Image (cartoon, coloured by chain):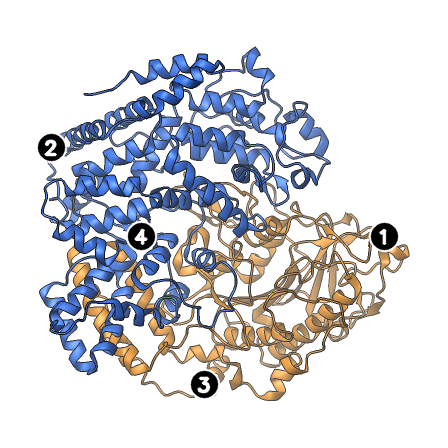
Chain colours: A blue, B orange
């Protein structure tokens, strides 16, 4: 194991010194060195595989073989950049004969700004209230800010910025998380969201009653809720407009209850999950600052685990704990040691999401095919133990961005009035609120009618695609059909598909019309809508 | 086994049936004697929140700044008065129950819209609740039919018109503009081209399923097949209003060209809604109910709609007259076709508006407001609940969202206490939130 420095110790020391100028200079200097390197990630990938494969062996389940290059290149582009690869990217990767090409591809994808944009796209969906006014504008602002953060900052700093944001949305997009409509987000909502997305626990059942089979008690919900009272604006409806988010130390659960006659408020002092009270020092700072410090401390038992589990869930299609945000004693992880290992290493890396992601996608577990070699119970067990890759459904954002990659920028949607924010409208229509399981397909007749018959999927976009294909003189129909498959599905056609496609072109008569029709068919396949 | 149900040539084979639409609709209606027909629901959604005082709970005794500019008129039921701008509906009062005790918790548009549609307030919660339409679609809808069981007409509040945890089968199909008809129901190119493309698609997908044996892929393919089936069906003609006689189309409201223009400077709607489209939406709803769809929601007021913070009186007047024509035509038409007893029409918005009228506008008011139930076999000709002199508070028979939705479900024959088991949620969730005692409106049942 190679570590350039002992991060937990170093970080703790820095935390104590952080207010001095010298420490500030040290931190800046150390940041570059302390980032967990590629070697560390490769090491961790090996440990992941040891854990996963030991478990498979002990259960007598055979692991699936590794995915071929075509499966891999499409999968890793979708997972890290939120889109299928371009025709050129796919061809270049498939033609590359060097043995370390997968690792190099992963490095280049993580170094590209699209990585942060994709994560930002996912997280703005979690963090923005779907019920807020002028949601489009807010989402765009938050998305831009998050993209920059994910590309350059570790997760503890991003979480801190979100939780402690102040000011107006125009000046600080991070406050968007704390606002709903013209008001601060309600205390119970912030408690629920923060605990689910940053701590991986569901406290909201405990809002009204002690959780029946989990240890969360009503006091725990309201103890955490008390950290969000200071940004509320009872009887000052315009404050968020005029001043933005501001902390008012006089506001507690008790004063809020008295001010607004809110149902069910249980007055409690701010108390961290697990029962620790605020220290005297912390009482002097805004409560949200104290919460962020507690949350992102290396010894916090939930923060790193939740992030590891969510990252694994997003990349592998299923969490080590399922549901992804419901970690508690009675809901055991499928691979407890693996979860511990990843949590420890992620914490040691300084909450470096790129490091964690690089380690997971470098593992054999991630790089296996999703094609079942077995059937029935054996196949189910193989999938449950991460012995085979899960097939994930393209999110609305991935679907839109993949269409753009394949066909070029969207043309006007036929039959729908042109409104601002085409991508926004599309993702609203095809998307799902909250965080649906990555493997669940949730589109029905309305979506498929639009997918088949609107200009957004077909229409004249396909002319551009067909024109871009390399149809230089002397190219055989085989070659053109192959290019089309590569452009849309990132793989060459099978022999049978090639035969069917050529037969189709003959039937249509005109090659360019035939290719356009064929392109439409490929965009409608199950395969295009899935990340396999 | 994975692709056993992939219907090759499904587009080609199902187009042959040559029923005329009139014949088909007529038969369906005739085959359903009153009382035995399964119930349907048409929700007339008044987006923005109509003033209760200026519509169904007039306050002639209140001071002028509360009473407003409108007169109350008598209805066909002695003792019940409503706004003068619902003159046609006033003659149909015997079929309707006005619920004047609505008293709800949310006074923000989106939060209230979500609450009134799903029955739950849980905003940031992990559970994605289904809209009333999706619930009814699941409980009353037929499984193997071409038409979706939940259809919305007009640009609706998308975040509230969702099937939530009930999944894609109950997702609403949205008709953005009833005058234009259903978008994307016809292939972009010629039918012949579409057929051969679908045929090739079946082959490609079958090969993928054989290789990957994946349920998500199968669901995608099933959804394609269902969409193609709808494209091929006779029932899609229910979306085509040009099949209706001109006299019927006019009864539902002025055709778009003749719709009354608002006075200069007064903005009635802001979005893409055309004048007159609500009436045509109501007509389409009738056609869909005839075709067997259990739940149709028609939205009135895209954009500003009934959200009359300014110009309250001219705008509410214009909206009321348009709504009155459409809603009265719908009730009369359903009645004459023998469908009123099996079709519950619900008129409501997300809340009412303040009694005080300041600067010519009324603001949001959720503590006391009105909704209306019509037909569906309820006991009509009555008012349930009462507000105080100013329409500010409910003094008799307060109605919560669960009380209201529980009653609507009961009228439709849906057991509102039945529990769903949403995936990933460790507890069963009743159709209507039963955590507080539900007081059904037994007066109307």
Q: Residue beneath label 3, please?
A: B21
Dot 1 or dot 3: first in sequence order is 3
Dot 4 or dot 2: first in sequence order is 2
Cα separation between marks 2 and 1: 77 Å
x and y percentages locating residue A415 in the rendered image: 47, 72
The reply to whether label 3 and label 4 mark residues of one chain is: no
The reply to whether label 1 and label 3 mark residues of one chain is: yes
Q: Residue beneath label 4, please?
A: A83
The disc numbered 2 marks a residue on which chain? A
Identify the secondary structure beneath mark 4: loop
Q: Residue beneath label 2, please?
A: A57
Tell me, yes or no, whether the two marked residues, 2 and 1, touch with CB atoms within 8 Å.
no
Quick one: label 4, few (<14), some, or many (20+) residues within 10 Å?
many
x and y percentages locating residue B42 in the rendered image: 57, 67
Q: Left or right: B383 with respect to B194?
A: right
Identify the secondary structure beneath mark 3: helix
Decide: is A258 above or below B227.
Answer: above
| Quarter containing the N terminus of chain A | top left
The disc numbered 1 marks a residue on which chain? B
The disc numbered 3 marks a residue on which chain? B
Tell me, yes or no, whether the two marked residues, 3 and 4, touch with CB atoms within 8 Å.
no
């Amino acid at each position: 194991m190679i570590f350039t420095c002992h991060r937990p110790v170093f970080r703790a020391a820095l935390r104590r010194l952080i207010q001095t100028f010298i420490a500030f200079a040290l931190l800046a200097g150390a940041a570059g060195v302390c980032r967990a390197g590629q070697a560390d990630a490769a090491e961790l990938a090996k440990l992941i595989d040891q854990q996963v494969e030991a478990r498979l062996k002990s259960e007598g389940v055979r692991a699936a073989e590794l995915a071929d290059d075509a499966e891999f290149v499409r999968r890793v582009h979708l997972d890290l950049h939120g889109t299928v690869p371009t025709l050129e990217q796919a061809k270049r990767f498939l033609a590359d004969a060097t043995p370390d090409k997968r690792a190099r591809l992963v490095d280049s994808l993580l170094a590209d700004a699209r990585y942060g944009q994709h994560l930002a796209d996912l997280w703005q969906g979690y963090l923005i209230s779907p019920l807020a006014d002028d949601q489009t504008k807010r989402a765009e602002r938050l998305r831009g800010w998050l993209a920059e953060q994910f590309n350059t900052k570790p997760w503890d700093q991003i979480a801190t910025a979100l939780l402690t944001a102040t000011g107006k949305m125009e000046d600080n997009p991070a406050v968007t998380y704390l606002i709903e409509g013209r008001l601060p987000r309600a205390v119970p909502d912030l408690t629920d969201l923060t605990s689910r997305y940053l701590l991986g626990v569901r406290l909201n059942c405990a809002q009204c009653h002690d959780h029946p089979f989990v240890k969360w008690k009503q006091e725990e919900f309201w103890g955490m809720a008390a950290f969000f009272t200071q940004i509320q604006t009872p009887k000052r409806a315009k404050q968020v407009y005029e001043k933005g988010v501001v902390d008012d130390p006089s506001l507690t659960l008790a004063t809020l209850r008295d001010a607004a006659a809110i149902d069910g408020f249980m007055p409690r002092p701010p108390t961290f999950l697990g029962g620790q009270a605020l220290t005297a020092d912390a009482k002097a700072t805004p409560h949200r600052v104290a919460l962020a410090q507690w949350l992102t401390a290396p010894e916090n038992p939930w923060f790193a685990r939740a992030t590891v589990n969510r990252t694994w869930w997003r990349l592998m299609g299923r969490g080590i704990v399922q549901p992804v945000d419901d970690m508690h004693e009675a809901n055991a992880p499928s691979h407890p040691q693996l979860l511990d290992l990843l949590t420890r290493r992620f914490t040691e890396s300084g909450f470096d999401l790129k490091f964690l992601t690089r380690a997971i996608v470098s593992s054999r577990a991630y790089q296996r095919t999703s094609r079942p070699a077995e059937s029935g119970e054996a196949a189910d067990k193989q999938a449950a133990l991460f012995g085979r890759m899960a097939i994930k459904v393209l999110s609305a954002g991935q679907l839109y961005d993949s269409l753009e990659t394949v066909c070029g920028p969207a043309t006007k949607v036929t039959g729908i009035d042109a409104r601002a924010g085409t991508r926004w409208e599309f993702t609203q229509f095809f998307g799902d609120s909250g965080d649906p399981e990555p493997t669940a397909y949730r589109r029905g007749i309305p979506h498929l009618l639009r997918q088949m018959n609107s200009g957004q999927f077909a229409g004249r976009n396909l002319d551009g695609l067909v024109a871009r294909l390399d149809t230089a003189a002397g190219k055989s129909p085989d070659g053109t059909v192959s290019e089309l498959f590569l452009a849309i599905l990132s793989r060459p056609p099978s022999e049978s598909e090639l035969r069917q496609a050529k037969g189709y072109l003959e039937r249509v008569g005109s090659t360019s019309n035939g290719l356009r029709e064929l392109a439409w068919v490929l965009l409608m396949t199950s395969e295009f809508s899935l990340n396999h | 086994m994975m692709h056993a149900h992939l219907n090759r040539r499904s587009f080609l084979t199902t187009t042959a049936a040559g029923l005329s639409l009139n014949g088909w609709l007529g038969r369906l209606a005739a085959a359903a004697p009153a009382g035995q027909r399964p119930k349907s629901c048409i929700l007339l959604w008044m987006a923005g929140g109509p003033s209760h005082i200026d519509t169904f709970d007039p306050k002639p005794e209140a001071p002028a700044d509360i009473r407003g500019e409108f007169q109350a008129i008598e209805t066909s039921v002695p003792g019940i008065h409503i706004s003068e701008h619902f003159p046609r509906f006033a003659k149909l009062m015997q079929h309707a129950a006005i619920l004047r005790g609505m008293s709800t918790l949310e006074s923000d548009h989106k939060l209230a819209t979500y609450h009134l549609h799903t029955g739950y307030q849980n905003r940031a919660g992990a559970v994605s609740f289904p809209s009333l339409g999706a619930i009814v679609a699941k409980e009353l809808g037929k499984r193997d039919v071409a038409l979706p069981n939940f259809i919305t007409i007009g640009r609706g509040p998308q975040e509230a018109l969702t099937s939530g945890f009930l999944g894609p089968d109950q997702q609403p199909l949205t008709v953005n503009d009833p005058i234009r008809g259903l978008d994307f129901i016809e292939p972009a190119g010629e039918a012949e081209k579409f057929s051969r493309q679908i045929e090739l698609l079946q082959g490609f997908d079958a090969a993928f399923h054989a290789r990957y044996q994946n349920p998500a892929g199968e669901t995608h393919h099933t959804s394609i097949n269902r969409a193609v089936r709808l494209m091929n069906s006779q029932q899609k003609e229910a979306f085509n209003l040009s099949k209706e006689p001109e006299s019927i189309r006019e009864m539902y409201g002025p055709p778009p060209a003749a719709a009354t223009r608002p006075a200069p400077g007064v903005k009635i709607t802001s979005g893409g809604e055309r004048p007159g489209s609500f009436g045509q939406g109501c007509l389409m709803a009738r056609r869909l109910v005839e075709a067997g769809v259990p739940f149709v929601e028609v939205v009135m007021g895209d954009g500003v709609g009934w959200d009359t913070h300014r110009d309250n009186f001219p705008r509410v007047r214009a909206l009321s007259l348009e709504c009155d024509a459409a809603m009265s035509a719908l009730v009369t038409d359903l009645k004459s076709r023998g469908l009123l007893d099996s079709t519950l029409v619900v008129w409501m918005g997300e809340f009412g508006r303040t009694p005080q009228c300041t600067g010519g506008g009324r603001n949001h008011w959720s503590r006391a407001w009105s909704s209306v139930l019509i037909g569906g076999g309820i006991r009509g000709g009555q008012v349930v609940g009462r507000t105080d002199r100013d329409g500010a508070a409910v003094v008799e028979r307060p109605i919560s969202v669960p009380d209201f939705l529980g009653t609507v479900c009961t009228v439709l024959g849906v057991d509102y206490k039945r529990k769903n088991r949403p995936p990933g949620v460790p507890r069963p969730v009743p159709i209507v939130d039963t955590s507080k005692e539900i007081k059904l409106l037994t007066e109307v049942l």
